[in-house]
Amino acid sequence: MRILLIEDDRETAAYLTKALREAGHVPDHAGDGLTGTDMALAGEYDVLVVDRMLPQRDGLAVVAELRKAGAEVPVLILSALGRVDDRVTGLRAGGDDYLAKPFAFSELLARIEVLARRRRPGESETAYKVGDLELDRLSHSVTRAGKAIPLQPREFRLLEYLMRNAEKVVTRTMLLEHVWDYHFDPQTNVIDVHVSRLRAKIDKGFSPPLLHTVRGAGYMVRGPRR
């Protein structure tokens, strides 16, 4: 997903930009509130991460300006001010979530993913199509080029999640949380095994391949390039 980070501390911004990119996202960065507001209004972002104390225009003013302009993009506010009154102020200013510094990146990433899901709840869709691959949640069926592909329940959930996030990198952590309901890494190759089995079923004998491994990042279901 595309994420705009509005943060004036260079070290924090560099760290978060690198970590978000490694998690498979596309982060942009603005170092002050005015630039961040302009970028947020001009770009199509899935989530904004906004520091509260910014030069030129503080974070709460940034959020207020965006809401005034009709922008509905979810906003996660970061701040060293972590008292209850501070959090309430941030949420009332138009923020969707509030995370106090210091924080763990894993929590930041989880909160970003939750905000993105709230905005685009793909669970309401009943069918997905990528190229000639089709999945129907109601009939619990999968076909490719019109040929039925039988899948085990876990393989079906894995493919459903990948197709729901088609054209996007899905990390191992995301798969563990959404397909296996794990909120920790079991340190096994369970994901690799299931992805390998799924790839053999949906790609073997068909062209082009649709399930791709993104080295060092995760996996992606992607339609044929035109």
Image (cartoon, rainbow, N blue to C red):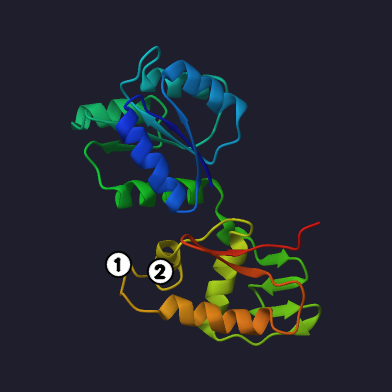
Quarter of the image where the C terminus is located: bottom right
Q: Is residue 41 above or below residue 219?
A: above
Q: Nearer the viewer, residue 101 or 138?
A: 101
Residue marked by disc 1: 184
Q: Amino acid at mark 2?
A: Leu
Q: Is residue 25 above or below residue 15?
A: below
* Residue 75 in view, yes or no: yes
Q: Nearer the viewer, residue 199 or 74?
A: 199
Q: Residue at x 76, y 59 (%)?
A: 225
Q: Residue at x 30, y 21 (%)?
A: 53
Left or right position of 134 against 8: right
Q: Amino acid at mark 1?
A: Phe
Q: Nearer the viewer, residue 152 or 193?
A: 193
Q: Is residue 158 above or below residue 44?
A: below
* Residue 70 in view, yes or no: no
Q: Position of residue 124 (x, y in %)?
A: 60, 59
Residue marked by disc 2: 176
Q: Mark 2 and mark 1 in contact? Answer it, CB < 8 Å.
A: yes
Q: Is residue 18 above or below residue 23?
A: above
Left or right position of 29 against 41: left
Q: Position of residue 179 (x, y in %)?
A: 46, 71
Q: Residues within 10 Å of mark 2 (few under 14, many from 20)?
A: some
Q: Position of residue 5 (x, y in %)?
A: 43, 33
Q: Secondary structure at mark 1?
A: loop
Q: CA distance from mark 2 to mark 1?
A: 8 Å
Q: Residues within 10 Å of mark 1 (few under 14, many from 20)?
A: few
Specify which label sits upstream in the sequence, 2 or 1: 2
Q: Position of residue 22 (x, y in %)?
A: 43, 52
Q: Residue at x 38, y 70 (%)?
A: 181
